[in-house]
Amino acid sequence: MKFGGTSVGSAEAVAQAAQLAVRTAAKGHQVVVVTSAMSKVTDALITAARQASTGRWNPALRQDLFDRHKTVADALIGGDTARHTDVLDVLRQRLDRFEKLCYGLSMVHELTPRLLDAISGTGEMLAAPLVAAAIAARGRPSHPVDATDVVVTTDQFGGAEPLMEETRAKAAARLKPAIARGEIPVVTGFIGATRDGVATTLGRGGSDYSASIIGAALDADEVWIWTDVDGVMTANPSEVPEARTLADVSYSEASELAYYGAKVLHYKTILPAFRKRIPVRILNSFNPTHPGTRVTVEGDASARGVKAVTSIRGVMLVAINGTGMQGIPGIVAKAFDAVAEQQANVLMISQASSENNICFVLSAADAPRVLAALRSALEVELMRGHIDEITAEQQVAIVAAIGDRMRGTPGIAATVFGALGKEGINVIAISQGSSERNISFVVTERDAAAAVRAIHRAFQLDTNH
Ligand code: ASP
Ligand code: MG
């Protein structure tokens, strides 16, 4: 079970999380908890690290963090003096470490990714002892476990990747004996350590990834992600009020949805669980009787074509145009080499068979760099007239219709584009991968919400069919 930042964001939330773990264990399940930092703590830590590295220093933050966690301890375990004292001691030790790291930063005036990881993981190291104490106070033995002792990672600080073999061995050694004794270990999400024991993080929002990694390492029956929404929805409810929670999605649908802007699960997160075919459930700790969404290999076998529709904003459409590109090999390769060199992520690509135009969509933040790189990489082609121009269109959005069972079902594209036509929405570019699980297209940002709604309606996604 993984609890997100809001699911451990207050004394009531932590009490609820502990309750959910204890109740599940009481039903005879073996439970391991993975916890995020309390909401907003990671942001505060990162800000503090940045400030410290410029020599500025906010001495109040340590006290703020201590108070916020102490409030939870007071409310949940205040009656048990020994346990309460122990938890406060642990909080103090961890805040000492945090303060020393920041002090070091303020001396050297340089924030390396490695130091940032050591600091930004503090939030989870504060939350885990609290959650464990809350569980223990509800009658199940429980201890906090630092994921630096469990999750072994590469040394890509700020976005480390798990080394599964090593992690498996450590998880078995560190967690299995406790589980066998009937304890509920509470592991810090988000963090890990290299083979040499240097602290790392898995990237922002990485606690879900931690849960999936630890679940896979322990051969869990299921991974449950407790969050503050009921599950994966057919569309963003702020865009489509009649959007509905999906009971079942497949791993591939979940990853398409994550890729295309639905914030519930990060694409990478499900990979370790997917490789072991472990079902992942998205559940709402603030509405725990809701069945949530189950992510499995087969998803919903009875589903029809399109299951969900999503949009991504803040993107830019880059187009390479020119009648002289026809039959000249290598232009595409050169273009994408230039993009790759800028470490920019391409969200969508489209080329018409006339070969007069290649266009692709990038995050707007990457686009200026990429454009400059493209113009210099393709300077000769521009000069010779093989390419007429390289343009960039801002204020566009990608809209994607997603569903495993779009594959081989004729008429889906007709319904998608028919719905847009009826609304008078102009489509700028279209792409369908050969996986046929996704039709994506580009519209102006102004049209995006209407496009999402039109498709949602055309496939009657508001009704449970
Ligand atoms: N606390 C970390 C973050 O805010 C990890 C997580 O919440 O999943 O990014
Ligand atoms: Mg979080």
Image (cartoon, grey):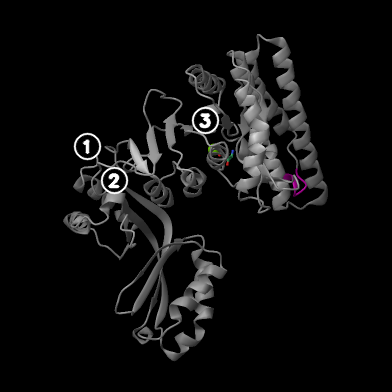
Which residue is tagged 3?
Answer: 1
Secondary structure of residue under mark 3: loop
Ligand 1 shows up in which quadrant of the image?
A: top right
Which residue is tagged 2?
Answer: 307
Q: Main secondary structure of the magenta part?
A: loop
Q: Is residue 365 left or right of residue 303?
A: right
Query: Can residue 58 be seen from the camera position used here?
Result: yes
Q: Which residue sits at x=25%, y=62%?
A: 426
Of the pair 111 and 408, the residue shown nearer to us: 408
Q: Are marks 3 and 1 in contact (CB under 8 Å)?
A: no
Amino acid of disc 2 = Lys
> x, y (%) of residue 36?
58, 34
Asked if the magenta segment contains residue 52, the reply would be: yes
**Mark carried by residue 463:** 1
Which comes before the other along the chain, label 2 or label 3? 3
Within-10-Å neighbours for mark 3: few <14, some 14–19, many 20+: many
> x, y (%) of residue 282?
43, 35
Amino acid of disc 1 = Thr
In the image, the segment drawn in magenta is 51-56
Q: How many marks can you see?
A: 3
Amino acid of disc 3 = Met
Which comes before the other along the chain, label 3 or label 1? 3
Q: Is residue 420 left or right of residue 333?
A: left
Reply above or below: 93 against 276. above
